[in-house]
Image (cartoon, coloured by chain):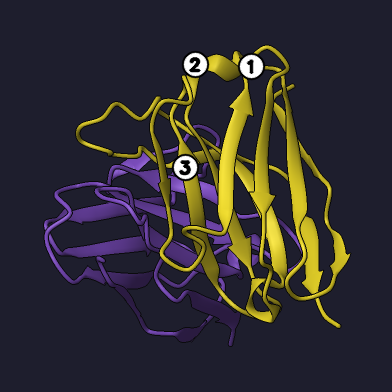
Amino acid sequence: QVQLVESGGGVVQPGRSLRLSCAASGFTFSSYAMHWVRQAPGKGLEWVAVISYDGNNIYYADSVKGRFTISRDNSKSTLYLQMKSLRAEDTALYYCTRDRGILVVPPAIGYGMDVWGQGTTVTVSS
Amino acid sequence: DIRMTQSPSSLSASVGDRVTITCRASQSIRNYLNWYQQKPGKAPKLLIYSASSLQSGAPSRFSGSGSGTDFTLTVSSLQPEDFATYYCQQSYSTPYTFGQGTKLEIK
């Protein structure tokens, strides 16, 4: 069945780095754009980043630009999020999601996130 | 950035009620508006995409409408499993912003 499984979360000190992974299965990973979305404890959803089907087009939320890097390995059906200079406000449950489209640019239009993983928790604390 | 504002932030209703949630964008997003349902401890699920298209597997009692800046999500007859938090999200331009959420509670 179509599935996304995140891993790599944990407790990390402010200023340190962490890499999240998302293993996809049950569909042709290379045919879809992919996102990271996060949710701080007790808060709403915050979109973090998107990468096009081929990895050539990438966009970030202002809150993570310059600190986070989204990437993908289509040969391994895996999505990544490299997080650097982590802050307390990055503490959240991080979801990997599939877009219904491929993200053709221009325009950078998304078509809704139809598959979600179960999330991996990142806690930034000293 | 495009700001998404949902109203109300919370809503109490009874099983069988018809309810409507509103989402307003700070500028036109054409019809690139999606609705998600999230239950406690679970990942969100896509209900409606492109403002009015029902996602496969979503119950037909859910419907969406709107274009430009004003959108609505309607549940025609609330069922017990519909009590959850609902989010709108624009996918017209990055950053793909979400509304703050509407918590639908049992009256």
Label 2 or label 3, whichever lies nearer to me, is 3
Taking depth in this image into account, of A103 and A2 the one nearest to the observer is: A103
Task: Determine which residue is flagged by label 2.
Answer: A31
* Tags 2 and 1 touching, CB below 8 Å: yes
> Which residue carries the number 3 mark?
A50
**Residue identified by numbered label 1:** A27
Colour chain B appears in:
purple
The CA distance from mark 3 to mark 1 is: 18 Å
In this view, the residue in front, A82 or B76, is: A82
What is the CA distance from the residue labelled 2 to the residue labelled 3? 14 Å
From the top left corner, tell me how far across and down residue A59 is, in percent.
40, 46
Q: Nearer the viewer, residue B35 or A79?
A: A79
Q: Chain of mark 1?
A: A
**Which is nearer the N-term, disc 2 or disc 3?**
2
The image quadrant where one finds the C terminus of chain B is bottom right
Q: Chain of mark 3?
A: A
Q: Quadrant of the N terminus of chain B?
A: bottom left
Q: Amino acid at mark 2?
A: Ser
Q: Is residue A1 above or below residue A95?
A: above
Amino acid type of the residue tagged 3 in the rendering:
Val
Q: Residue, x 68% and y 12% (percent of image)?
A: A75
**Residue located 20% across and 36% down the image:** A107
Shade of chain A as shown in the rendered figure: yellow
